[in-house]
Image (cartoon, rainbow, N blue to C red):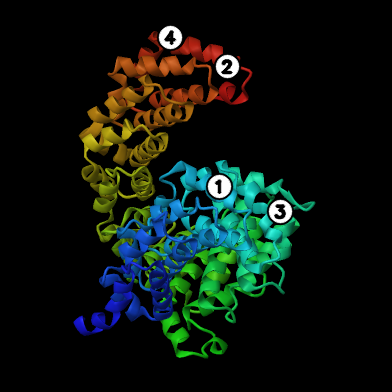
Amino acid sequence: LQEVTASSRHYVDRLFDLDPQKVLQGVIDMKNAVIGNNKQKANLIVLGAVPRLLYLLQQETSSTELRTECAVVLGSLAMGTENNVKSLLDCHIIPALLQGLLSPDLKFIEACLRCLRTIFISPVTPEDLLYTDATVISHLMALLSRSRYTQEYICQIFSHCCKGPDHQTILFNHGAVQNIAHLLVSTSYKVRMQALKCFSVLAFENPQVSMTLVNVSVDGELLPQIFVKMLQRDKPIEMQLTSAKCLTSMCRAGAIRTDDSCIVLKTLPCLVRMCSKERLLEERVEGAETLAYLIETDVELQRIASITDHLIVMLADYFKYPSSVSAITDIKRLDHDLKHAHELRQAAFKLYASLGANDEDIRKKIIETENMMDRIVNGLSESSIKVRLAAVRCLHSLSRSVQQLRTSFQDHAVWKPLMKVLQNAPNEILVVASSTLCNLLLEFSPSKEPILESGAIELLCSLTQSENLALRVNGIWALMNMAFQAEQKIKSDILRGLSTEQLFQLLSDSDVNVLMKTLGLLRNLLSTRPHIDHIMSTHGKQIMQAVTLILEGEHNIEVKEQTLCILANIADGTTAKELIMTNDDILQKIKYYMSHSNAKLQLAAMFCVSNLIWNEEEGSQERQDKLRDMGIVDILHKLSQSSDPNLCDK
């Protein structure tokens, strides 16, 4: 290091010369020495050139030419490695450059902006540094009108530093839309492109921005029309892709209808084109991910995409080779693509998940694509968390098909890798994997048995204790599906696994979804007579307590109806009936709900009564007498005159 730095030392020494002219020449020589030379850049940083350059840049006494050359050298140092950028940040380069933007000299401003741009596009720079001083954004907006370079660099800074809704709001409130819109028709391609990128990050998942963009016009033309022109095949690929992203965000935000021709005839086909194997790896990834987002919630778009350019077959290539033969002209590209091949797999899984979200025929086509199930199973155990998540999403989408649950899912024992994924995955994977498990546990699914044998009950019971709401819902939902028409042993295992405390915890959960699924589980557990009697003999007291608790609480009609149906199931037991008949409080509640203003609750309460009074069952006479004494017959007389035919019949 000493030898190397010794040869570079004279560059730094000259920065301290007393003659300003020699200092300027030293900076210019340094500039020429570091261009394209990473080693030289590192040496100068080690030798402490950065603090001195920053000092000269900020000195009022420095000539504008010197200050500009300092900004250029700093920009060149920033072009090196990430470590270089870290060193510059440690020397507080950003405040110094932002201060420089207040200068009246345009050349100096442009040099500061170019350097800021290089620093902000580095992954090691925190975006928030742009937003620490509120005046910075409005000053940048004002500088947009100065030159095509200020336009290009400022748009690039904005598009790299706009991460998430907070940043979008700040830029939007500072007039980003109005200030940047006219740059879309600039004579400079670079300016047009950076402005377009700005809009693509501003509009992403942001209804406020999207709704505004629809009505903005430049030179008498609305922005969506300008975006559509930028989608055309004769435009550069990055321009086509970025404008497709803008239109996609606007469509998902509801600013453009999904059946609008600019989506169906322009945006969707453009994104499908990006998936072709002639495109570069990153274009194929971005194309597929954007298309997946565009069609995610719309059945019609899913159908159109599935029959455009053989998309389903085309995506199978994403699993084969990362580059098309025509793209492998240089070995560097091949090396890059092999390292990033997992991104292609992730994108393909995402798009398959969106394509198969609703339509049975599309799911069938996806599953019949060569080795599809094997690919998903492999994807579930990949090292990349993004691939695992996308593979689980894809599996979840396909698991909505009854047909596939019975066939392909069974043939490939999909449940095995799925159970493995559930062992210790991060929450975002757990949520989708547990949703998939819910589908695999439906009563017609042949996977139900082996899943039970592999310790699913324990796993699902632990999910119901999660802090994460979606996991609690899925855990209890899967148990509900598992208990449906299950044998008594499974039901007992579920109750043992959950524990009474946990059951009460779930029944007092603040989320109505958790409550409804827990009641659904109870209802499924309390079905068929021997099971009802067995469970009520072991857990009767607690279950009756829970029922009372809910019927007295502030709950919606659906919750109360489900609870009364559980009572009706208990009333259907042979010995379990007595738990109702000896509980005056519950009997009064049944009576109360028979006269309720809501017909659903009245019907559910009458089910309880009818299950208690069957003539052919032992003890029916005593039960009928007790109910008669309570005045139930009078209520029934009244209800037989009801205008509601269902109530009348019952």
Query: Which label number is shown at residue 343?
Result: none
Q: Secondary structure at mark 1?
A: loop
Q: Residue at coordinates 40% horizontally, 56% vertically from top-left?
A: 58
Is tag 2's residue or tag 1's residue first in the polypeptide sequence? 1
Amino acid type at circle 1 is Asn
Seen from this angle, which residue lies furthest front?
A: 19
Q: Earlier in the sequence, mark 3 or mark 1?
A: 1
Which residue is more in the foreground, 277 or 555? 277
Closest to the camera, between mark 4 and mark 1, is: 1
Q: Are marks 2 and 1 in contact (CB under 8 Å)?
A: no
From the image, tell me which residue sits under label 2. 640
Q: Residues within 10 Å of mark 3 (few under 14, many from 20)?
A: many
Disc with the residue nearer the chain's start (4 vs 3): 3
- Tell me the residue that label 4 is attached to: 631
Between the residue at mark 2 and the residue at mark 3, the CA separation in whole angstroms equals 64 Å
Looking at the picture, which amino acid does disc 4 mark? Gly
Q: Distance from label 4 to label 2 (Cα)?
A: 15 Å
> Residue at image x 44%, y 60%?
120
Q: Which residue is mark 1?
A: 206
Disc 4 versus disc 3: distance between alpha carbons?
Answer: 71 Å
Q: Quadrant of residue 542?
A: top left
Q: Residue at x 74, y 50 (%)?
A: 217
- The image quarter in which residue 389 lies: bottom left
| Residue 536 left/right relative to 22 | left
Estimate the spatial distance between the alpha carbons at disc 2 and disc 1, rounded to whole Å. Answer: 55 Å
Pointer 3 residue: 223
Q: Nearer the viewer, mark 2 or mark 3?
A: 3
Identified by mark 3, the residue type is: Leu
> Does residue 142 appear anywhere in the picture?
yes
Instruction: Tell me which numbered mark, 2 or 3, is placed earlier along the sequence.
Output: 3
- In the structure shown, which secondary structural element does the residue marked by tag 4 occupy? loop
Percent position (x, y) of residue 69?
46, 68
